[in-house]
């Protein structure tokens, strides 16, 4: 048995949820992990992107998707929250590099005092040969959550997060104005965030 005596009570509860998610694929365990950590991850990212709430929400959803995709690599050497924050931070760095944004210096970005604030490097291609399998697993997990969305938003979310379409590509695919795509994705993210936080209220 792995020694987890160094973990806080909250971290031990997270570990139990991770084990349930891995052993049984229990969607309730995934939902509970998201409900427990959604807000801290979101607020951390929101601060790093200078209050761009929509971008922070999108990056939060991506961070959970990547974390669940690599969940088998988590070990209780660190708290689950520390591991999750490192994935969220690395995902943000990747985004900023791709978009060539100049919001803040990357070298000074992550000097905060979050819990156990070590930045753990998660290689982008940990299991390159199994990359397609891992992607399918991530989509399977997220699909269970997306199915809880209002039907009007499911197609948009699937195109954006499963097929990784750009806003322009979604507009072309669905033959709707770009502004409509942005507005509906905004509302779908709001609803998704309610689901992630444990509220089933429909928008």
Image (cartoon, rainbow, N blue to C red):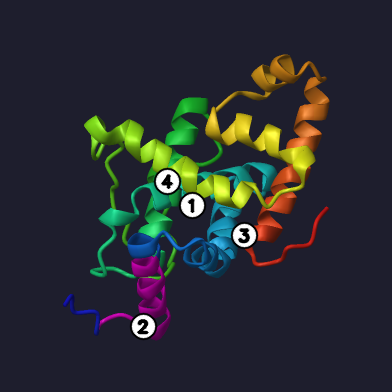
Image quadrant occupied by the N terminus: bottom left
Task: Report the residue marked by disc 1.
Answer: 64
Reading the chain from its start, which is encountered first: label 1 or label 3?
1
The residue located at (61%, 34%) in the rendering is 158
Secondary structure of the residue carrying numbered label 4: helix
Q: In the rendered view, would you say 120 is above or below 180?
A: below
Residue 106 appears anywhere in the view: no
Which residues make up the magenta segment? 6-20
In the drawing, what numbered circle is on residue 8? Answer: 2
Reading the chain from its start, which is encountered first: label 2 or label 4?
2
In the drawing, what numbered circle is on residue 66? Answer: 4
Secondary structure of the residue carrying numbered label 1: helix
Residue 33 appears anywhere in the view: yes
Q: Position of residue 185 (x, y in %)?
A: 73, 37
Q: Are marks 1 and 4 in contact (CB under 8 Å)?
A: yes
Asked if residue 52 lies in the magenta stretch, the reply is no
Of discs 2 and 4, which sits in the foreground?
Answer: 4
Q: CA distance from mark 4 to mark 3?
A: 15 Å
Asked if residue 8 lies in the magenta stretch, the reply is yes
Of discs 1 and 2, which sits in the foreground?
Answer: 1
User: Is 54 positioned to the left or the right of 131 in the image?
Assistant: right
Reading the chain from its start, which is encountered first: label 3 or label 2?
2
Q: Position of residue 86 (x, y in %)?
A: 38, 54
User: Is 18 positioned to the left or the right of 95 in the image?
Assistant: left
Q: Are marks 1 and 3 in contact (CB under 8 Å)?
A: yes
Task: Report the residue marked by disc 3.
Answer: 196
Reading the chain from its start, which is encountered first: label 4 or label 3?
4
Q: In the rendered view, would you say 136 is above or below 200?
A: above
Q: CA distance from mark 2 to mark 4?
A: 24 Å
């Amino acid at each position: 048995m792995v020694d987890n005596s160094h973990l806080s009570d909250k971290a031990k509860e997270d570990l139990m949820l991770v084990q349930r998610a891995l052993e049984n694929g229990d969607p309730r365990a995934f939902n509970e992990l998201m409900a427990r950590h959604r807000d801290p991850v979101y607020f951390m990212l929101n601060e790093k992107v200078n209050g761009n709430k929509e971008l922070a929400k999108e990056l939060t959803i991506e961070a959970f998707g990547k974390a669940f995709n690599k969940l088998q690599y988590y070990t209780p050497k660190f708290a689950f929250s520390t591991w999750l924050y490192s994935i969220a931070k690395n995902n943000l760095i990747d985004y900023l590099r791709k978009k060539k944004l100049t919001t803040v210096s990357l070298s000074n970005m992550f000097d905060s005092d979050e819990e156990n604030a070590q930045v753990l490097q998660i290689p982008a291609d940990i299991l390159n040969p199994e990359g397609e399998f891992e992607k399918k697993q991530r989509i399977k997990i997220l699909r269970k959550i997306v199915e809880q969305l209002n039907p009007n938003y499911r197609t948009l979310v699937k195109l954006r997060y499963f097929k990784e379409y750009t806003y322009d590509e979604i507009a072309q695919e669905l033959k709707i104005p770009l502004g409509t795509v942005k507005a509906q994705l905004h509302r779908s993210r709001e609803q998704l965030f309610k689901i992630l936080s444990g509220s089933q209220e429909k928008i």
